[in-house]
Image (tube, helix red, strand yellow):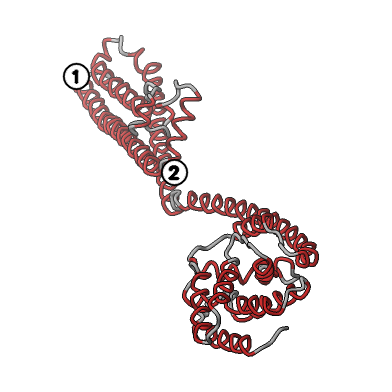
């Protein structure tokens, strides 16, 4: 590599400048990159047979081309020119050569548009890593730096897209760089495309997993929003108790009906045939009263067990307004299956509606039970009081018959 006093001073100045002033976030465009560009520029220039005087300009431009990063990413080429001018002016470097060096530095701006051989060489040297085996490592450093300095975070797929776009549009300008680096650059490009496909496939897999996870979370949430076990148990036990109480009421009514029917049949078969005799005329009123009590008891027993069936119809408006209890068969037995299914879907999808329907079902079961037990109590009271009065009536009747001289 060409070395002289101005180049040594430039190297030392750039090293100290980047060491003291370059932000730590600049992990790619640092002194190591600058040194690699200088070495690559020297390598290409020697192969392209650049004369010594031009070599000096090229290497000075290479040393200063990224020094502008100490003042930020934006327009760092222009900032690099100012730093190079300030240094070279202090060294008394010729103005025309300083201008040439600035032009070489400016050629590194992407998209690169070199206008002479020296500019072509520094452009190829600056992007030398595109055709190097360590391209991926350099690319990762460049990505980290870009995201920090530009404040724009890229996904892996977006970064691969940027690399693919850049590699597809890039070309080396010098014959030496083209011949040496193009093959490896093509390999790097192919790797980028493969990595991009893998990243897309992985992203699709992650999206699918997230979709399944969301579905699972949604299912768990829906499960969590269902009535809690304690509430379900309460409704189940209460409903079971209601049904048991209803069965007890029906059993009691059946007992009373059976007893009354037996009494009625005995009275009709044994007592009634004796009433047509003049001697038994005293028994007519007690017997009729006894039969009336028996029949009245049977009527109330039947009323307590008589089922009531409602219209069996409801409208979609009733469902939307939550006015119908779909858990009771009497409300839907005349409806079409499709309408009933739609109504039940509405019920199951609305937790509040479901709770209120269960409450309504329990409430009206309670109303029915109250009616059953009220009628049953009346029936038992009539039967009990009627039996007592009937027995007293028959005793009085027999006493009156004895006093009248009738013999039994």
Q: Nearer the viewer, residue 27 or 276?
A: 27
1 shown above or below 44 = below
57 shown above or below 386 = below
> Left or right: where does residue 125 sit relative to residue 67?
right
- Does dot 2 land on a helix, a strand or a loop? helix
**Quadrant for the C terminus in the image:** top left
Residue 269 in the image, given as x and y percentages of width and height? 40, 16
Residue 18 image-quadrant placement: bottom right
137 shown above or below 313 = below
Question: Which residue is disc 2 drawn over?
Answer: 240
- Does dot 1 land on a helix, a strand or a loop? loop
Q: Which residue is at a point 41% across and 24% down the rendered structure image?
A: 262
Question: Which residue is disc 1 drawn over?
Answer: 404
Residue 295 in the image, given as x and y percentages of width and height? 32, 21
Residue 404 in the image, given as x and y percentages of width and height? 19, 19
Q: Which residue is at a point 56% across and 67% down the rendered structure image?
A: 106
């Amino acid at each position: 590599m060409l070395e002289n006093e101005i180049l040594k001073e430039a190297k030392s100045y750039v090293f100290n400048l980047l060491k003291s002033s370059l932000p730590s976030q600049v992990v790619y465009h640092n002194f190591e990159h600058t040194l690699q560009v200088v070495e690559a520029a020297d390598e290409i220039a020697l192969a392209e047979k650049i004369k010594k005087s031009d070599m000096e300009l090229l290497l000075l431009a290479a040393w200063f081309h990224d020094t502008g990063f100490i003042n930020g990413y934006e327009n760092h080429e222009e900032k690099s020119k100012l730093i190079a001018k300030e240094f070279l002016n202090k060294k008394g470097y010729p103005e025309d050569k300083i201008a040439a060096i600035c032009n070489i530095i400016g050629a590194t701006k992407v998209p690169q548009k070199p206008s002479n051989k020296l500019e072509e060489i520094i452009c190829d040297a600056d992007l030398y890593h595109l055709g190097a085996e360590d391209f991926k490592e350099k690319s990762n450093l460049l990505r980290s730096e870009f995201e920090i300095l530009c404040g724009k975070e890229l996904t892996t797929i977006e970064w691969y897209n940027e690399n693919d776009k850049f590699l597809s549009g890039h070309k080396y300008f010098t014959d030496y760089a083209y011949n040496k680096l193009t093959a490896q650059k093509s390999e790097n490009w192919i790797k980028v495309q493969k990595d991009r496909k893998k990243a897309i496939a992985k992203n699709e897999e992650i999206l699918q997993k997230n979709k399944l996870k969301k579905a699972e979370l949604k299912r768990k949430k829906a499960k969590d929003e269902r009535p809690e076990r304690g509430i379900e148990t309460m409704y189940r036990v209460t409903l079971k108790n209601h049904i048991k109480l209803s069965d007890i009421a029906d059993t009691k009514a059946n007992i009373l009906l059976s007893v009354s029917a037996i009494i009625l049949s005995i009275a009709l078969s044994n007592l009634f045939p004796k009433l047509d005799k003049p001697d038994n005329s005293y028994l007519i009123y007690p017997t009729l009263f006894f039969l009336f009590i028996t029949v009245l008891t049977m009527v109330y027993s039947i009323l307590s067990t008589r089922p009531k069936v409602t219209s069996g119809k409801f409208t979609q408006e009733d469902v939307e307004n939550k006015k119908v209890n779909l858990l009771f068969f009497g409300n839907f037995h005349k409806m079409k299956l499709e309408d009933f299914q739609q109504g039940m879907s509405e019920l199951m999808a609305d937790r509040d509606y479901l709770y209120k329907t269960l409450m309504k079902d329990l409430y009206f079961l309670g109303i029915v039970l109250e009616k059953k037990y009220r009628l049953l109590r009346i029936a038992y009271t009539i039967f009990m009081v009627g039996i007592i009065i009937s027995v007293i009536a028959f005793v009085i009747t027999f006493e009156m018959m004895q006093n009248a001289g009738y013999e039994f």
